[in-house]
Amino acid sequence: YTADGFMEYYLNRCVFNSSDLKDIEYIFSMYYNKLEYARFSSSLGKYVGYTEFGVKNAERWNNDPSELTQWRAEKERYCKRSV
């Protein structure tokens, strides 16, 4: 999405340290205007904010059990098929 020349985008990625699922990290990053403002990391099992906006949203998302359950399952769904 672009407005006034700024762009928001999301990036899903898997970091493979081996082909064993327990050694794979799933990362979902959120960017605005080329700056990562928040990310979900399967290694941490929660969101981390990198800007004031990101920290505020990470706190909200981390307090929602259904949100965390959904993203914790993404590692298996998104990364396992790539092994």
Image (spheres, rainbow, N blue to C red):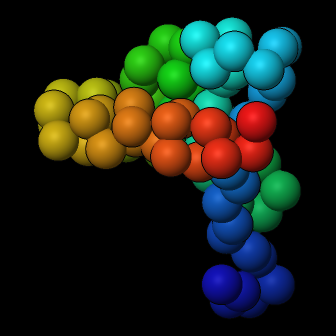
Instruction: Where is residue 47? Give x, y as percent.
Output: 45, 29
Instruction: Where is residue 17? Give x, y as percent.
Output: 83, 13
Instruction: Where is residue 19? Give x, y as percent.
Output: 78, 20
Tell me what residue is drawn at x 62 percent, y 38 percent.
80
Does 76 sit above or below residue 44? below
Classify residue 75 as left or right of residue 5. left
Tell me what residue is drawn at x 39 percent, y 37 percent.
73
Does 78 sit above or below residue 42? below
Tell me what residue is drawn at x 56 percent, y 26 percent.
41
Front residue of 2 and 40 = 40
Does 45 sit above or below residue 74? above
Does 70 sit above or below residue 46? below
Classify residue 5 as left or right of residue 52. right
Quadrant, the N terminus: bottom right
Classify residue 52 as left or right of residue 36. left
Q: Is residue 51 visible?
A: no
Front residue of 40 and 32 = 40
Quadrant, the C terminus: top right
Tell me what residue is drawn at x 78 percent, y 63 percent.
33
Classify residue 75 as left or right of residue 1. left
Front residue of 39 and 45 = 45
Instruction: Where is residue 21? Give x, y as percent.
Output: 62, 20
